[in-house]
Image: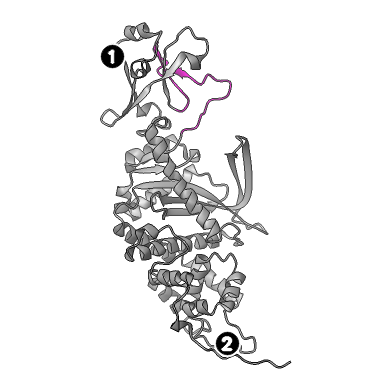
């Protein structure tokens, strides 16, 4: 059976690229990759140069941008997609082995190339830091509200020596406590809650707890990006980051208001309400997560029914204390224990009712400037979902859901390159005057 060779009737250069290719072009234009490419080209000097470093680098960025989980998947895409080959720079490459008719580099070329990239991790970090500073310069409100979370990165197949088993506890939609396990790694991520862009990240073994990773990342951010660090107003994270020392350091040393819910540390058999000041007889009680109560019905045997939550009146910065107001006066509720308040020293009686101030120093884990039981905390804490959406993009758009990498250095490299792609894409949108499209992942900046 004879075959007819088909000649090329047109060049991709004569047509507008697809939206995905336009986005790739825009990102490649905004990558500060000159230093990295110079080092890689210098290392290849006087060695085989069948596939240029620039072409391999561009195709590696394309692989992560389009969510290819394996090298084989990237090679198949290059072989079928002439437009992508042209943008990456492979159309001009002479085939080193014409009999095999390769349209893309073989897998071993990419394996060696990724190994070289991992060895130059410091240059990848410099690219991320450079893009982060540029985005911060272009967006004056970038970095004010932050959100932190961790993400499991399971390893499929054989277990690498630098990975281990991670455990996560969570409550499902029906309220049942569940425990999940995975072998591999964990990505610790801090993002801007408004623009949903990465601020800082770290890859560890899967067993690494969330809380101990937070402050080293924040300290490193202060050292490398002092101007951006000075903008930060608040940081939201889940209960996995509930640590009194970390919360105190965030507020005292960094000026960052922690939006981290306190855990209920009391056992089921313990009384959930206890005296605020055990050393004196008073009507004021506290809950396990910082809610302040006043005993309004002293004869009621049920502690919860005998107490009413005091009205939170805000944080007094000069005093370093949270202010609460009498629930009977604030809500016009019936109080059967008014006389007890009158007998207490330094308590003023009047229409406004009794005022109680709780200093933050009483318990830095529970008492925060943004009180956990206030409406303000609930409104600000909702912004934590931004980091969950970024984690979702890592899974669905950038191939982290089923990655087949088997070393911490390769996972770190993949994460770093994806973070660079996110910031470079954002920079292209900003300079195009389309800041509202920063979080879009399908269409390019034009």
Magenta residue check for 261 = no
Is residue 157 among the parts visible in the rendering?
yes
Q: Nearer the viewer, residue 398 or 21?
A: 21
Left or right? Give the position of 25 relative to 405.
Answer: left
Q: Would you say 366 lies left or right of 51 here?
A: left
Which numbered circle lies on residue 96?
2
Along the line of sight, the residue nearer the viewer: 260 or 351: 351
Across and down, in percent, residue 321 comes to 32, 27
Q: Residues within 10 Å of mark 1 (few under 14, many from 20)?
A: few
Q: Where is residue 426 in the image (x, y as percent from the top left)?
A: 39, 61
Q: How many marks?
A: 2
Q: What element carries label 2?
A: loop
Tell me residue 409's x, y (percent).
Answer: 53, 61
Q: In which quarter of the image is the C terminus?
A: bottom left
- Point 39% across, 33% down: residue: 375
Residue annotated with mark 1: 351
Coloring basis for residues:
one colour
Give the CA distance from mark 1 to mark 2: 90 Å
Q: Give the range drawn in magenta.
A: 262-289
In the displayed structure, would residue 440 be above or below residue 57?
above
Circle 2 residues within 10 Å: few <14, some 14–19, many ≥20: few
Quarter of the image for residue 422 reads: bottom left
Quarter of image, res 257: top left
Q: Residue at 41% of width from left, 64% of height from top?
A: 425
Our reading of the magenta stretch's main secondary structure is: loop
What is the quadrant of the N terminus in the image? bottom right
Q: Nearer the viewer, residue 208 or 18?
A: 18
Q: Where is residue 33 in the image (x, y as percent from the top left)?
A: 40, 71
Residue under the point 51% across and 62% down: 414
**N-term-proximal mark, 1 vs 2:** 2
Please give the label number shown on residue 278: none
Q: Which residue is drawn at 37% across and 57% down?
A: 436
């Amino acid at each position: 059976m004879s075959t007819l060779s088909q000649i090329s009737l047109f060049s991709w250069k004569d047509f507008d690229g697809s939206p995905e290719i336009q986005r790739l072009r825009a990102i490649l234009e905004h990558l500060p990759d000159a230093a990295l490419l110079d080092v890689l080209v210098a290392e290849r000097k006087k060695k085989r140069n069948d596939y240029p470093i620039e072409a391999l680098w561009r195709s590696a960025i394309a692989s992560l941008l389009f969510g290819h989980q394996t090298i084989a998947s990237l090679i198949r895409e290059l072989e079928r997609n002439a437009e992508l080959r042209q943008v990456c720079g492979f159309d001009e490459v002479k085939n080193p082995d014409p009999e095999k008719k390769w349209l893309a580099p073989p897998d071993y070329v990419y394996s060696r190339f990724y190994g070289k990239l991992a060895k130059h991790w410091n240059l990848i970090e410099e690219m991320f830091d450079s893009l982060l500073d540029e985005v911060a310069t272009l967006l004056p409100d970038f970095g004010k509200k932050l959100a932190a979370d961790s993400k499991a990165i399971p390893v499929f197949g054989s277990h690498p020596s630098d990975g281990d088993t991670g455990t996560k506890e969570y409550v499902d939609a029906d309220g049942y406590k569940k425990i999940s396990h995975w072998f591999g790694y964990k990505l610790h991520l801090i993002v801007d809650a408004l623009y949903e862009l990465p601020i800082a990240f770290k890859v560890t073994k899967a067993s690494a707890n969330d809380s101990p990773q937070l402050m080293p990342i924040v300290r490193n951010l202060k050292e490398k990006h002092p101007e951006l660090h000075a903008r930060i107003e608040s940081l939201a994270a889940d209960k996995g980051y509930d640590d009194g020392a970390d919360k105190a350091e965030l507020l005292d040393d960094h000026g960052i208001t922690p939006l981290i819910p306190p855990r209920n540390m009391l056992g089921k058999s313990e009384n959930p309400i206890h005296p605020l000041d055990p050393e004196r007889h008073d009507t004021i009680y506290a809950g396990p997560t910082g809610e302040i109560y006043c005993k309004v019905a002293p004869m009621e045997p049920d502690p919860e029914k005998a107490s009413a939550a005091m009205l939170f009146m805000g944080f007094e910065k000069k005093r370093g204390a949270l202010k609460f107001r009498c629930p009977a006066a604030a809500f016009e509720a019936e109080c059967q224990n008014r006389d007890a308040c009158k007998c207490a020293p330094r308590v003023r009686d009047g229409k406004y009712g009794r005022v109680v101030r709780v200093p933050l120093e009483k318990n830095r884990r529970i008492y925060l400037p943004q009180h956990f039981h206030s409406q303000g905390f609930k409104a600000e804490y909702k912004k934590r979902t931004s980091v969950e959406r970024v984690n979702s993009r890592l899974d669905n758009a950038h191939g982290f859901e089923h990655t087949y990498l088997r070393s911490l250095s390769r996972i770190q490299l993949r994460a770093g390159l994806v973070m660079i792609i996110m910031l470079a894409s954002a920079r292209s949108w900003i300079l195009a005057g389309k800041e509202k499209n920063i979080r879009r992942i399908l269409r390019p900046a034009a």
